[in-house]
Structure formats: structure tokens, C-alpha cells
């Protein structure tokens, strides 16, 4: 372990499980460590680097905006923020004409819960088992994993968890007290489980019938990840609130809650954020959204994602239970714990994520090339088929 790693260990909070790697540079789908080793990055900063690392157009936008003006709260108008709001709402489903800008996924979910309570005059939230929505107190209440929630009880009251992809269970849980149902279109952290069209469209129908709002959490699935700009497009969904973050600004922290017509108009002072809508993040986001469209990255993700899944399906290994996913959001469920395999992949130049204990999650930058996909598949094939003593 290097001295710098020891220094970080000494002073950091301790809430992250660390890997023995010091990353110093990135470009496209590649990262380099301080020893000069190259990695294909199938973690992409937990699905942030959809455009690849340090995309030149994002870098240029950040540099130019930084030199002009970094901070400007939303009490003032700002031209780049206006441009971002126009572009973002134009990409969203019809009827979503407004957005609350914040700085992370969990903040987008917090905003969604406040707006849902305010709009409906109700307090309860229905969320899904295995769902992940963030780690601040409100969002954490809707996150499923007990390991994240238990030490921080009591959380906000009135949050129910129902099994994912079971329309009848959702139907039974939504009442005239339900302010909102919050769902991921593909559950990410919970193991890469795509929602079925029947379930998600059913959820939308139930919400409309009972006066609850449908919140879709596309923090991970948004901006091309699943092969569409938003995953909701696969099923033609029209949520009332759409939460986004992660890759929205090409790697710069930003989140947003997009608001549909059933959200009651918000009045000044109801909510806010010091950094929300700041020019630096807005400029990065404008550049990132332009790149997504210009380079047609959702279509590229659909194509390379299909290739990746096909090739992973061909791996003959008794360790694999299932390969599943949508676009470039792929999970390989194993019959045993994934930690040693993630380590073995790192040694072969591929960085991947876990999703729970038994799923290897691949979230490569959408600019990943076919040659890089082949190298990833080869590394995974090797670590899952070579004789190991796990
Ligand atoms: C990552 C994630 C969040 C939380 O985002 P942060 O920026 O880490 O707060 C919320 N929902 C989903 C689906 C996520 O993947």
C-alpha cells in the first residue's frame, strides 16, 4: 500500500469499502492507475461516465464556464441554466416542462417526495423490495437494503416496500393515503432486474386511478444507459416525477427532479438548494446532453449492450446462474459471492461493480468500443471458467 493510500485511509470517513488502486487519469472507456496500468472501466463511477471519461466537449464547456462564472444561485436568471432546462425538458416525456435542479441522485429523490406530499396532501410512499433510491433520510426510507437502513432508525414513517414486478402486490399496497409510488425501471443496485412492461404500466395505471403520483427513479438508467435516452421509453411510460442524476452532467455532480402536469405548482421557499442549477454544472450538462444526442449514444448502447449480453450468454461456466440486463446495464448473477471475481477481473484490467453479494454489474461508458467489449468478455470468461479454489 502506498503512502498516499495510507494517508487517505487515515483521514477518510471509513464509509467506503476501498479497492487497492489509485486511479489518476481517464479517457473514453479507459482508466489508468498511478503505476501506469490500463483498465477498461465497467464501473464508470457507478454509471456516471456514460460519455466516457473527460469527454473533450465537456472539458471545454467546464473550462470556459469556470473562467466566466462558477456560482450563481437560482434567485438570478442565468443563460446556461435556461439552455439546460430547455434541453432537459425537451428530452423528457411530453408534459414534463419543469425541473428542480440539485446536486445528486438522493437529492432528486428527496425533492420528489416533498413535491409528492405537497401535491397530494398525502404522506405515504410505496417503494419496491430490492429498490435503491439513495442514502439521505427520506430517500433511505425508500431504499430496501436493511444494511443501509437499520442503523439509522427511525426513518420517515409511512413507507411500504412491496415485491418488484408483482402488479397485484402493488395494487394491494396503494391506497387513498399514498402520496407516491417510487420505482426504478431497471433495479440497479438491487441486482440488475429489469421491470416488466406489464408491471410498470400497471403501476402507472394504479397511481392515476388512486390519485397517487408515479415517481420513476432513473438516476442510474437515464441518459442512454439502457439503449434509450430514458429507460421509460422502452415501455412508453409517463411518470409524474422523473428523478435523474449520475451521468447528467458528464461527470460533474448534478441531479434533477423533472415535474409533470400532476405536480402542483410550487411556490417560492417550498424547497431549494444553494448549488442547484449552478452555471458550472449546467454548462457541463448542456455539453453532455449535446454529446449524447450528437453521438447517438443511446443507440450505441443498445447495439453494444446486445452484443455484450450475447457474448456473455455464450460463456460456459457452472458458476453463472443468469445473465440479464437492458442496453449497457448488465448483471451476471453467480451461484456464489462475486468479490473474489471482481478482484480477479481487476488483475486482468477490467473494473466492474457488485450489485448485492452475487451479481457482477457492468455499467461501461456508452462509448465503449467492440474491441473493448471483446476484451471484457474474454476477461470475464477467463475468471469464471479457470480453476479456482473459491
Ligand atoms: C445512485 C442512485 C441513487 C443515489 O444517487 P446519489 O447521487 O449517490 O445520491 C438513487 N437512485 C438510484 C437508482 C441510483 O442508482
Image (cartoon, helix red, strand yellow):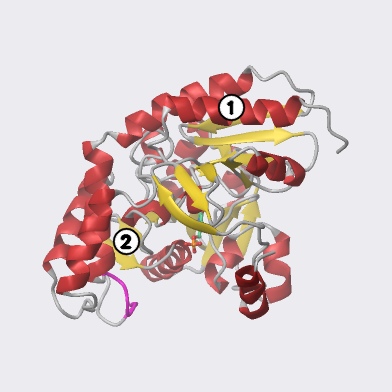
In the image, the segment drawn in magenta is 270-277
Residues at marks 2 and 1 touching, judged by CB atoms closer than 8 Å: no
Q: Please tell me which of labels 2 and 1 falls first in the chain.
A: 2
Residue 143 - label: none
Q: Quadrant of the C terminus?
A: top right
Label 1 SS: helix
Whether residue 273 is visible: yes
The answer to whether residue 168 is left or right of residue 226 is right
Q: Position of residue 357 (x, y in %)?
A: 74, 47
Image point 18% across, 72% down: which residue?
Answer: 67
Image point 63% across, 68% down: which residue?
Answer: 5
Q: How many marks?
A: 2
In the rendered view, tell whether residue 108 sits above or below residue 6: above
Residue 377 - label: 1
Q: Is mark 1 within 8 Å of ligand 1?
A: no
* Residue 21 counted in the magenta span: no
* Residue 274 counted in the magenta span: yes
Residue 225 vs residue 314, the one in the foreground: 314
Q: Which residue is mark 2?
A: 263
In the rendered view, tell whether residue 229 sits above or below residue 105: above
Quadrant assignment, res 34: bottom right
Quadrant assignment, res 146: bottom right
Q: Position of residue 212 (x, y in %)?
A: 44, 56
Q: Nearer the viewer, mark 2 or mark 1?
A: 1
Whether residue 94 is visible: no
Q: Position of residue 147 (x, y in %)?
A: 73, 63
Amino acid at each position: 500500500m502506498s503512502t498516499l493510500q495510507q494517508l487517505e485511509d487515515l483521514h477518510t470517513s471509513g464509509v467506503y469499502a476501498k479497492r487497492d488502486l489509485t486511479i489518476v487519469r481517464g479517457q473514453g472507456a479507459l482508466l489508468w492507475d498511478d503505476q501506469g496500468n490500463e483498465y477498461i472501466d465497467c464501473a464508470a463511477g457507478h454509471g456516471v461516465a456514460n460519455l466516457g471519461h473527460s469527454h473533450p466537449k465537456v472539458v471545454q464547456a467546464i473550462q470556459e464556464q469556470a473562467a466566466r462564472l462558477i456560482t450563481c444561485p437560482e434567485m438570478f436568471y442565468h443563460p446556461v441554466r435556461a439552455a439546460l432546462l430547455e434541453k432537459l425538458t425537451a428530452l423528457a416525456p411530453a408534459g414534463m416542462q419543469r425541473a428542480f435542479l440539485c446536486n445528486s441522485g438522493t437529492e432528486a429523490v428527496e425533492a420528489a417526495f416533498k413535491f409528492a406530499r405537497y401535491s397530494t396532501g398525502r404522506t405515504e410512499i410505496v417503494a419496491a423490495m430490492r429498490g435503491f433510491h439513495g442514502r439521505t433520510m427520506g430517500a433511505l426510507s425508500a431504499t430496501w437494503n436493511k444494511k443501509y437502513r437499520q442503523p439509522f432508525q427511525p426513518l420517515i414513517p409511512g413507507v411500504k416496500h412491496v415485491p418488484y414486478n408483482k402488479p397485484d402486490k402493488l395494487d394491494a399496497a396503494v391506497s387513498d393515503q399514498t402520496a407516491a409510488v417510487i420505482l426504478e425501471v431497471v433495479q440497479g443496485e438491487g441486482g440488475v432486474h429489469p421491470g416488466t412492461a406489464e408491471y410498470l404500466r400497471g403501476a402507472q395505471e394504479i397511481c392515476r386511478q388512486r390519485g397517487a403520483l408515479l415517481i420513476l427513479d432513473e438516476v442510474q438508467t437515464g441518459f442512454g444507459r439502457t439503449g434509450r435516452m430514458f429507460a421509460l421509453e422502452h415501455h412508453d411510460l409517463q411518470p409524474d416525477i422523473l428523478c435523474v442524476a449520475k451521468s447528467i452532467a458528464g461527470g460533474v455532480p448534478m441531479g434533477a427532479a423533472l415535474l409533470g402536469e400532476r405536480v402542483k405548482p410550487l411556490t417560492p421557499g417550498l424547497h431549494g438548494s444553494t448549488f442547484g442549477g449552478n452555471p458550472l454544472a449546467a454548462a457541463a450538462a448542456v455539453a453532455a446532453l449535446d454529446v449524447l444526442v450528437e453521438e447517438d449514444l443511446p443507440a450505441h448502447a443498445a447495439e453494444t449492450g446486445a452484443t455484450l449480453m450475447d457474448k456473455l450468454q455464450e460463456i460456459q461456466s457452472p458458476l453463472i446462474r443468469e445473465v440479464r440486463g437492458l442496453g449497457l446495464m448488465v448483471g451476471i448473477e453467480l451461484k456464489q459471492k462475486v468479490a473474489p471475481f471482481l478482484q480477479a477481473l481487476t488483475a486482468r484490467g477490467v473494473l466492474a461493480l457488485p450489485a448485492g453479494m452475487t451479481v457482477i454489474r457492468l455499467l461501461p461508458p456508452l462509448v465503449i468500443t467492440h474491441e473493448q467489449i471483446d476484451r471484457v468478455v474474454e476477461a470475464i470468461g477467463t475468471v469464471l471458467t479457470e480453476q479456482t479454489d473459491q
